[in-house]
Amino acid sequence: MKKEIFADGIGQIHFAGGMVRFDFMTLQPGPEGTAPTPEYNERIIMPPQGFLGAFNSMQQLIDKLLEAGVLKKNENAAK
């Protein structure tokens, strides 16, 4: 059986021990009326070449989502 993992986002990406480490997080409800708090719960570790391949795949998907109109470029974003 394949395991499926959900994450609200990546809390941190760092480079240590020659590997790229992604710390994924989920947002946990805070007390009534307060903002959710991030909880780190999964880590993916990959070599730099794997990271580069993943980055290229994500960039290709971003380009397709822009082309399809699902995402819009933010022309005012700081460069």
Image (tube, helix red, strand yellow):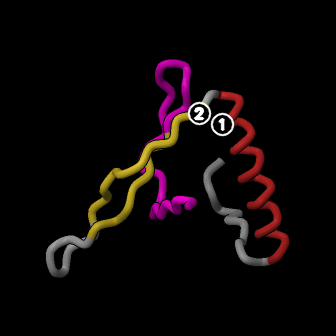
N-term-proximal mark, 2 vs 1: 2
Residue extending farthest to the left is 31
Q: Position of residue 53 (x, y in %)?
A: 74, 39
* Residue 6 falls left or right of residue 79: left
* Residue 50 falls left or right of residue 43: right
* Residue 49 falls left or right of residue 46: right
Could you tell me which residue is drawn at 48 percent across and 33 percent down?
14
State how far apart marks 2 and 1 are (Cα).
Answer: 6 Å
The kind of secondary structure element at disc 2 is strand
The residue that mark 1 highlights is: 51
Do the numbered discs 2 and 1 sit on residues whose CB atoms are within 8 Å? yes
Q: Magenta segment: does it hold 3?
A: yes
Q: Quadrant of the N terminus?
A: bottom right
| In this view, 53 is above or below 16 | below
The kind of residue on which mark 2 rests is Met
Q: Position of residue 44 (x, y in %)?
A: 51, 42
Residue 61 found in image quarter: bottom right
Residue range (magenta): 1-21
